[in-house]
Image (spheres, grey):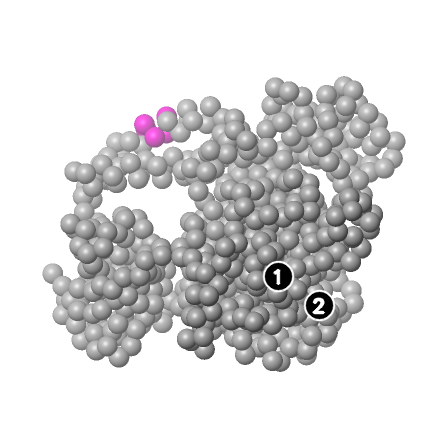
Amino acid sequence: MERVLIKLFIYLFLFLSFSSYAHGQVRRYVPGEVIVKLKNKTGVSGQSFLGKATSQKGLRVRGAFKRMGIYHFAIKENQKVEDAVEEMKADPDVEYAEPNYIFSKATVGNVTQSFSVLEVSAMASASSEYYMATGAPIQVTNTWASIVHNSVPIVAVIDTGLNMNHPVFSTTDAVWQNPGEIPGNGIDDDGNGFVDDVNGWNFITNSGVMLDDDGHGTHVSGIILGVTQDIYTPPYPSAKMRIMPLKFLDGEGYGKTSDAIKAIYYAVNNGATVLNNSWGGNSYSAALHEAISYTYDAGAIFVAAAGNNGANNDSSPMYPASFAVPNIISVAATTDTDALAYFSNYGHSSVHLASPGVFILSTLPSGYGSMSGTSMATPFVSGLAALMKTERPNLLGYQAKQLIMGNTDSISGLNSKVVSEGRMDVYNTIQATKLANISGSQPPYKYTNADRNLSSSIAASGCGVVSKMISKGQGGPGGGSTPESWSIFILLALLALPIIVYNALRQKNPKDKRQHERFKINSEVKVKVGDRELIGSISTISLGGVQLNTNAMLESGGIVSMVIRSPDGAEQIAIEGRVVWSEAQKAYGVQFAQTSQAIHERIATWTKSLVKAS
């Protein structure tokens, strides 16, 4: 009965979560703020609007992108954002108005394991094949010797900041230095509008201190640098590219559209040619769209995380990855075995390729650690883009995108999932880049601001974490849900309760509803659960999962990574799964995540010699 009640609560939670997503009742934006673009950027009508905005509408300017005619306003106290947006839209001087949406980092869970610099160095020395903790053959290390370093590209990491004192960055000269700024003199020496922006900028505190109070930005930066050189074995080689840390995400991984836009303009105006964006959300922002079109005009490469909701971006777009700007590369995540990660968003017409994104080992402020998400897949592609720019400095963003997509490794598990139907291949892409005809011009592009109803704008977390999405609600520090939306949730839940209860009672045991034949097997299995590594055995196996036997306590619903030996012990497969049932904390049912055709074929071959289980 306890299992039935647990399932009932899970169903109810998932139902409420889906309702909030499908019906657009959860909105995440900054309370009391709007973003407005004027039709006339510098003319009389624009000045007229700014005058009446302060004197008649009670607005206060919080920031401006005057070249684009875009302004960031604080609205009147107690005025609803929705009302302010509609009031702005009705003004003849306004091209568009929108809330200041909130976006978030695109990781799944927390750091799964952590190591010191010395521990990672020892592991790397023990294995010549040790690289990025991914078994996917992306061909990184064998590419380095073939690169001709004709330039030192700048990669802007728009994220949570960077620990510049980490030896991987501090001893390699990997952090960008503003050549026009004199450190610590309190003067804007280069006249770019930022005082003492020696290595980048913090758009939350408006300072040149980009402290990484989350760890996400440091992890992402390490992956980018690690595509171009060894980051595990000191002494580290001198960097052939530069990381420009631009902080707009806070210590919980959330950031404002207004700050993201500032970071994008800063990156391009200060020489960045590759922009890494391991963050996102479901809210369309015309201002953000226009900012990214600015990066296209500048010839930059804009790499974005596809998102971690396990959703189809073709029908449920994730921004900025889903903007149709020609220089955007939207990246899904794959496992070591080239399966699409269970959490990764996909889209046959909107997500361009995949790269490794599960248990990726990279730098953290205090050492090294593993993280998972399209956040981790994205910087692999940014690192590849940096290598391409070192080889061919004049390569434009849309050309780099075509080369990367055209030289992927075809993966059956990515068929109809991403545009290229492939996973990135560093070596093949670099060789194609060497021979490519580089054009000095590109097709014109101008964004189109589709008329979108505010009530249909859903700002779901890039991580898909509903609890955080609600805690950052409109009544709190970050925009959110309305009381009316909760009444709708409750009403829908009550209407659906009889069906939920019926199904929960009808399916008392997940083992009673198997989709695949089970076979008896007695095989050793290595299991990784978070930062724990266990040895166990499996007693049954099917194409859908295994029965895992271990005395360790495993959490129902938890994710485990397994290395399973074949019945004859001659080979092994690495596969990821979710715990779906347990018996006395000794036997567990693990359902496989999405697996590649090759893995299916290996398991099918194993079971030919096995006896069916009852």
Q: Residue at x 45, y 75 (%)?
A: 125
Amino acid type at image mark 2: Val
Check disc 1 and report the residue beneath it.
Answer: 170
Determine whether the residue tagged by mark 1 lies in a helix, strand or loop.
helix
Whole-percent x, y for residue 32 in the image: 62, 27
Check disc 2 and report the residue beneath it.
Answer: 152
* First of labels 2, 1 by sequence position: 2
Q: Which residues are magenta?
A: 491-495
The verdict on residue 574 being magenta is no
Q: Quadrant of the N terminus?
A: top left
Amino acid type at image mark 1: Ser
Q: Residue at x 49, y 58 (%)?
A: 367
* Whether label 2 touches label 1, CB < 8 Å: no
Horizontal side, residue 348 vs residue 101: left or right: left
Nearer to us in this view, 597 or 32: 32
Does 457 sit above or below residue 148?
Answer: above
> Rounded to the nearest whole Å, what is the CA distance between mark 2 and mark 1?
17 Å
The residue carrying pointer 1 sits among few (fewer than 14), some (14 to 19) or many (20 or more) residues within 10 Å by Cα, namely: few
